[in-house]
Image (cartoon, grey):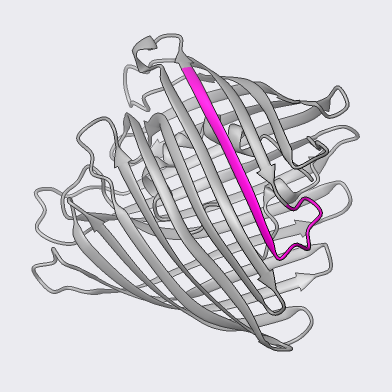
Amino acid sequence: MAISASMAILLISPSYAEDFTLMVTNPDPLGLGDFVPSDADLDLGIEGKFKGDLSYGIGIYSVYNSNFFQTEDNEESELTTSLVPWLHYISDPEGGAMISVVANYSPSWNTYLENSDLNAFDQAGNITLSFSGGKSHLDVFAHYVEISGTDRLTGAFVQGTIMTAGLRATRQIASRTSLNAGWSYSISEYGSGDYEGAEVYTTYFGGLWQATPRISLGPTLRYTISESDNTGTCDAWALLFEARYHVGERLWLSASIGPEYTKNSNDTNNDSGLGLTGNLTARYVINERWTWTNSLRSATVPAPDETNYLVYNVAFNTALHRQLRSGSFGFGLQYDFSEYKDVGDVSSDVGNENYTSLFVNYQRPLYKDRVSFNTEVRYTFNEGQEDWSQWQVSAGLDVSF
């Protein structure tokens, strides 16, 4: 059973809280059924293994931020220290059981050197109940995050919660054909500031046909409802074409793209929109030492601080990972384009945001893989309503008991 401090690291990652507003749009925050293995599945030298069904540990992390509040002028630096215990449970570590349960919980106590009034207790937890039998597979899941940090779309330090629950199912109906369906509900709430959260319902149904041993193709019909006091109700229908390509253990590619028709209840001009939506993930094992990962994702979320605006966000991530004799290092780039679209009467125009982040990280196991050392340097700059930049340097230790 391989476990890691991925949840703990996720809570205190310098870039995690910055995307708080957009988290509610992810119908599958646990990555259930992902065709392309995630970074957590890559062998980066951080084993973190513990024999048995129950694993637990504790981490301590510090993050220096040169522009903590992401302001154009009067930048304030901050040093954040987080104490993060974590717990991981899996009922079927060997695999093969008809019914299995996976659960994680990780609280985090965050203290700030310069802004002690912002000290906060955050936490994250999730549980997945899986049923596998013959040609069918079903996952039922729930995910909860309580987090604080500076959100880049509101441009302010926020405290908030996000809860997501849903189910995902697949059924093999022929030797080369499968059907898949899912439903999820997400809700975000801001515990500070005059910001409005959102509720997002997502339903999809699709199928895949294995054209060749390497290529699978198929359509997916998706229906999304987004509700917010700022924007009313937004209905979106998308018809996606999905393609998957797999070459042994070296290359994995999953892409979906298609038109999306949206209509908003606050749109007094009945100006419904037809746009393009989609996602792409890829992993390429260049050789035994180097791995290249990429992702491209589009999402639409009600603006938390603007009336009658939706935020259309396109996020691109690319990273190279280098396996070392002990541990690994990586470097890459994250780019987000956020376009504000008016869906009714608005008082003023809101400009678009261009967010770019460059990072280098290093990980190393210590003491027979019971301890892992993690560090990252990240430079970020934003162009839009406010032009700002910041340096972030983080380091931490995670101990498995």
Q: Which percent across, then down, holds residue 42?
A: 76, 49
Q: Main secondary structure of the magenta part?
A: strand
On-image quarter of the C terminus: top right
| Vertical position of residue 106 compared to residue 284: above or below | above
Quarter occupied by the N terminus = top right
Residue nearest the viewer, comparing 346 with 369: 369
- Range of the magenta residues? 92-110
Q: Quadrant of residue 384?
A: top left
Q: How many marks?
A: 0
Q: Is 98 included in the stretch rendered in magenta?
A: yes
Instruction: Tell me if residue 362 can be seen.
Output: yes
Report x, y in % for residue 266: 13, 63
Task: Give the residue displayed 80% in from the left and 40% down from the top.
Answer: 52
Relative side of 369 to 314, left or right: right
Q: Residue at x 21, y 63 (%)?
A: 233
> Of all residues shown, which one is farthest toward the bottom?
174
Q: Toward the viewer: 363 or 172?
A: 172
Q: Is residue 366 above or below residue 77?
A: below
Do we see residue 33 in this rendering?
no
Q: Can you give x and y, in whole percent of width and height, for residue 26 in the image?
A: 45, 55
